[in-house]
């Protein structure tokens, strides 16, 4: 990466931090640092599970616990067990917490207006459009990838979305019972793996692998949410799958796909996958690809 580019990003970060008052431990003049104020906003009107809060903001457990304890001492937050699962802890705003959150909303609007007021209408539009573009371009850096339990609620949701999309796009629809299997057992170590992509804690994509020792690993169930397309998530899921395949001793990765999935076919070819003769009896496959791992 060019050192000039790095300096520009650091300069941009400093300008934004100064503009929104992040350098002050009395953020928006409310007597607490920005991290505490952000948690009040994220907890919201209806409360949130601590696990969800931690994943959404990418916080470690220690920092989250200390920050919530501070808000609890201030009488703004209360912590209790989830009514349906005592093992799950939830954070909710107290009456004072709701009032404080409303005041933070008002003051945040004041800061935003302060950024716009010195500009004429044309420059305002340029700034808003540029901010929207920057926000979207920054989202890929917030995406996290991890091997997860294929029986989990989010994993099943991803697979269901994958099946639904295939059913909508294939000329004759899609029946999972007719397709080659990739069940929970086959996607659990040491037989395989399911990798889930998350943005602010929400699942936005997945890819699965079936391992066969030194023989090529099978890539299955690759899906990216429509809301996350254009962020490079598919390419990075593919790279994560290849990395896991290498770690499990595979010398290559194989996959089959349907002719209706033009974007996927283009991605595989760009990533170095080569079309080969059919190696499976997958009834929905029109193309078979393989890539040697180095």
Image (cartoon, rainbow, N blue to C red):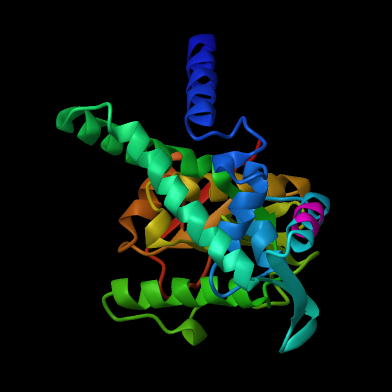
Q: Main secondary structure of the magenta part?
A: helix
Q: Residue at x 75, y 69 (%)?
A: 188
- Residue 270: say if magenta: no
- The reply to whether residue 89 is visible in this rendering is no
- 160 or 250: nearer the eye? 160
Q: x%, y% of residue 19?
A: 47, 29
Which residue appears farthest toward the bottom when viewing the image? Answer: 84
Q: The C terminus appears in which quarter of the rendering?
A: top right
Q: What residue do we see at 34% from left, 41% from top?
A: 132
- The relative height of residue 226 versus residue 185 in the rendered view (above or below) is above
- Judging depth in this view, the residue of 189 and 68 nearest the camera is 68
Q: Is residue 274 left or right of residue 100?
A: left
Task: Give me the residue at 50% from left, 56% from top.
Answer: 103
Question: Which residue shows up at 55% across the image and 64% down it?
Answer: 99
Q: Quadrant of residue 124?
A: top left
Q: Is residue 111 left or right of residue 168?
A: right
Task: List x then y, in percent, for residue 202.
Answer: 55, 63
User: Residue 179, relative to residue 122: is it above or below?
Assistant: below
Q: Answer with left or right where residue 28 lies relative to residue 173.
A: right
* Image quadrant assignment for residue 72: bottom right
Q: Is residue 213 visible?
A: yes
Residue 53: x and y, percent? 65, 62
Residues drawn in magenta: 66-70
Rendering quarter of residue 211: bottom right
Instruction: Say above or below: 144 vs 81.
Output: above
């Amino acid at each position: 990466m060019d050192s000039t580019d790095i300096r520009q990003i650091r300069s941009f970060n400093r300008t934004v931090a100064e503009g929104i008052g992040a350098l002050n431990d009395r953020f928006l003049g409310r007597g607490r640092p920005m991290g505490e104020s952000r948690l009040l906003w994220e907890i919201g009107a209806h409360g949130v599970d601590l696990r969800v809060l931690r994943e959404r903001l990418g916080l470690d457990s220690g920092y989250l616990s200390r920050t919530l304890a501070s808000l609890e001492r201030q009488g703004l937050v209360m912590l209790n067990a989830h009514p349906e699962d005592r093992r799950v802890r939830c954070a909710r705003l107290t009456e004072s917490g709701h009032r404080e959150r409303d005041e933070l909303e008002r003051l945040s609007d004041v800061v935003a207006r302060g950024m716009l007021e010195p500009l004429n209408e044309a420059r305002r539009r340029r700034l808003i459009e540029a901010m929207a573009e920057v926000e979207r371009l920054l989202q890929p850096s917030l995406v996290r990838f991890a091997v997860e339990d294929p029986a989990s609620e989010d994993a099943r949701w991803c697979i269901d979305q994958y099946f639904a999309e295939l059913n909508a796009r294939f000329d004759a629809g899609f029946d999972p019972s007719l397709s080659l299997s990739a069940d929970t057992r086959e996607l659990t170590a040491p037989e395989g793996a399911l990798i889930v992509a998350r943005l602010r804690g929400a699942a936005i994509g997945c890819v699965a692998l079936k391992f066969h020792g030194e023989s090529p690993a099978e890539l299955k169930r690759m899906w990216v949410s429509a809301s996350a397309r254009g962020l490079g998530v598919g390419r990075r899921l593919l790279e994560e799958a290849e990395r896991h395949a290498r770690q499990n001793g595979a010398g290559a990765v194989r996959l089959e796909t349907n002719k209706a999935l033009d974007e996927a076919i283009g991605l595989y070819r760009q990533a170095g996958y080569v079309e080969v003769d059919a190696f499976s009896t997958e009834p929905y496959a029109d193309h078979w690809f393989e890539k040697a791992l180095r």
